[in-house]
Amino acid sequence: MEYYVKSVVPMIESNYDNFTTVEKNIADFFIRNRKKVDFSAKAIAERLYVSAASLSRFAKKCGYRGYREFVYQYEETFIEKEESMTSNTRMILNAYQELLNKAYSLIDEAQIARLNRYLNQAERVFVCGKGSSGFAAEEMEHRFMRIGVDIDSIQDSDLMRMQAVFQDKRSLVFGISVSGETEPVLYLLREANKRGAKTVLLTAKNTEIFDRFCDEVVFCPSLRHLNHGNVISPQFPILIMLDIIYSSYVEQDKFAREVLHDNTLLALGEGRKRGSDLK
């Protein structure tokens, strides 16, 4: 059974902060709508008290040539949903399923292939983040380190600023900021980019500013407009994308990298055994 369909909603969410007040009103409708209605420009303009020109500008900011193309894609992937939920557990599971659907809609496999090239070419890799994003950065370090990548994670703001000085063309820097507003992370990316390092930002926010100092912007699913998003771990959307990057990287040289992973498990096991023998 196929669970995942490409949806325009994640693209609306990633561009949300770029919209005017009128456009946000339009965005809110398409994000929250659960019923099959007349989505024609005339009907939606009347329903939302906006002009057809506003619908067109909104669609273009979402990356479409116009409202007709936008609404065609919206209708193609629209699934009518019942508002009523039978239990809290079902609501949480549905929220996770919606996040997975959003990730499916955002993933760019050509971009993942480019990230793999950067990882193969880099002599050293840094990944930074604050709070929940910092925990995800640490998880990325542990996973990639075990398959032979020279990688360090940074969660301290001062260390991010200091490390920026040492980046050069041999470096690859991942920054994680779901909000796109974590200044120490953005500072490290900006300074690393100036010094010739490859830079990658994982975020739920889309803005042209990032293109000035990021070689790649990887969009993560947003919790912002999700029912019960406030009880979902903020790490989850990031970890989905990191798992996809990790899996793709391992697949390039699966046997060698699985051997390295298994050898780290053996080394950890031997270390624990020796520690217990000394007691």
Image (cartoon, rainbow, N blue to C red):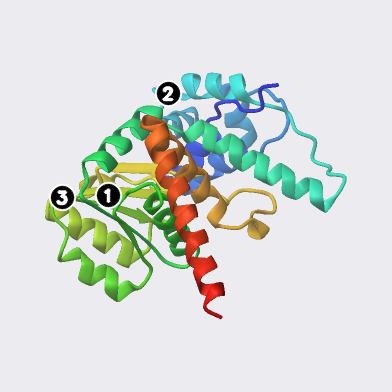
Q: How many marks?
A: 3
Q: Quadrant of the C terminus?
A: bottom right
Foreground disc of the pair 1, 3: 3
Q: Earlier in the sequence, mark 3 or mark 2?
A: 2
How dense is the environment of label 1, judged by Cα within 10 Å: few (below 14), some, or many (20 and up)? few
**What is the x, y in percent for residue 77?**
61, 23
Alpha-carbon distance for marks 1 and 3?
A: 24 Å
**What is the x, y in percent for residue 71?**
54, 23
The image quadrant that residue 95 belongs to is top right
Q: Quadrant of the N terminus?
A: top right
**What is the x, y in percent for residue 271?**
47, 66
Foreground disc of the pair 3, 2: 3
Question: Could you tell me which residue is drawn at 33 percent across and 31 percent down?
Answer: 113
Write down the residue under mark 1. Answer: 209
- The secondary structure type at the circle numbered 1 is helix
The image quadrant that residue 33 belongs to is top right
Write down the residue under mark 2. Answer: 66
**Badges 3 and 2: C-beta atoms under 8 Å apart?**
no
Q: Is residue 56 left or right of residue 194?
A: right
Question: Could you tell me which residue is drawn at 35 percent across and 73 percent down?
Answer: 156
Write down the residue under mark 3. Answer: 170
